Image: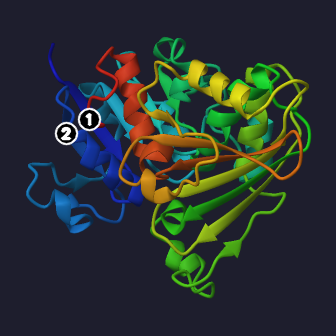
Amino acid sequence: MQKLNILVAGSTGYIGTELIKLLVKHKEVNIRYLCGNTSVGKNIGSFDKSLINKKLPKIIKFNEKLLTDVDVIFTALPNGEAQKISNKLNNHNTLIDLSADFRLNKAKLYLKYYKIKHSSVKNIKNSIYALPEIKKRKIKNYKIISCPGCYPTSVLLPLIPLIKSNIISRKKIIVDSKSGYSGAGRGVHKKYKKKNLYESLSVYGIKTHRHNSEIQQELDLETGKKVEFTFTPHLSPMFRGILTTIYCSSTKKHNINSILLMLKTFYKNEKFIKIAKKNSFISTNDVINTNNCLISVCESKQKNQFIILSAIDNLIKGGAGQAIQNLNLIYDFKKNMGLK
């Protein structure tokens, strides 16, 4: 089979460079174009030293003509930009988007949370919220693949199977997430210049964080129930990684062993979901530079209450790695192609 020609738009951000680092190891793709706006003419190696000696094209400005000779377009652009590109796609193009442009299934919701009027409403129905382990059987039927946000990935993977099977209560779930500052992009130092990023832990987005809408949508859709949760994100003094702590209650007759059994059964064929031994204390260090999601279930001091821990690398499992997982699903490549 001939290699897929790839275009990466937004190639110089943290997610974009992480994506390229993985794509250069993928045996079935050829990186044809790297696109950016403020970095035209530069080599991608100037943004990540590990790419200096790779034979990669120089960064150019995106234009519609480039779509004629590529198969897959990865977009790691500011919100709103992938919508514009989606309106120009050819029949042979597949768009894999790492922004929020197609994560919400209603244009009104997108406007409410992102303060941008959706410019490709007709394509919302042509897109799928592509959490690979959950939507794997449907993904290849779509030409617009919307990769989940990093926080939602860490939240949805442990919660969906447990709520769906009625092992934990769908009410009063508390989600506490801590992320490395790379999740805010290269502009994080300007945006949070008064936060002392390297030495302080900051809470933000209480009630208003955009990922609330994404988590709510997918929990309700996948479980068929109205799920009540409170989500609080934190910016942590580390570059990468997310550790999510979920406080929940079991339904009748269920204990830590039945919770663990359900997770292990649900994900038994999934390479990138790792279930730790019960009451394991896990950390982001266990998953950094991998496409794994590590899940631990711990007992609380309160009867029938449990603490579920979920750790991912926000730039890989929460971004670039998940995008390649979706690529592999669409084209029937090995699950770990480019992700070893």
Q: Is residue 135 above or below residue 75?
A: above
Residue 106 appears in the picture as rendered: no
The residue lying at 29 percent from left, 38 percent from top is 7
Place of residue 181 in the rendered image (x, y in percent of width and height, measured from the top left):
53, 68
SS under mark 1 = loop
The residue lying at 40 percent from left, 30 percent from top is 325
Place of residue 269 in the rendered image (x, y in percent of width and height, measured from the top left):
46, 18
Amino acid at pointer 2:
Lys
The quadrant holding residue 251 is top right
Amino acid at pointer 1:
Gly
Residue 55 appears in the picture as rendered: yes
Which label is found at residue 338? 1
Q: How is the image coloured?
A: rainbow
Place of residue 29 in the rendered image (x, y in percent of width and height, measured from the top left):
21, 30
Q: Is residue 302 above or below residue 118?
A: below
SS under mark 2 = loop
Quadrant of the frame with the N terminus: top left
For disc 1, the neighbor class at 10 Å (few under 14, some 14 to 19, many from 20) is many
Which label is found at residue 25? 2
The quadrant holding residue 155 is top right
For disc 2, the neighbor class at 10 Å (few under 14, some 14 to 19, many from 20) is few
Q: Nearer the viewer, residue 92 or 254?
A: 254
Q: Nearer the viewer, residue 229 or 247?
A: 247
Q: Nearer the viewer, residue 21 or 167?
A: 167
Which label is found at residue 129? none
The residue lying at 65 percent from left, 35 percent from top is 158
Q: Are marks 1 and 2 in contact (CB under 8 Å)?
A: yes
Place of residue 104 in the rendered image (x, y in percent of width and height, measured from the top left):
69, 35
Spatial distance from mark 1 to mark 2, Cα to Cα?
5 Å
Q: Is residue 329 above or below residue 86?
A: above
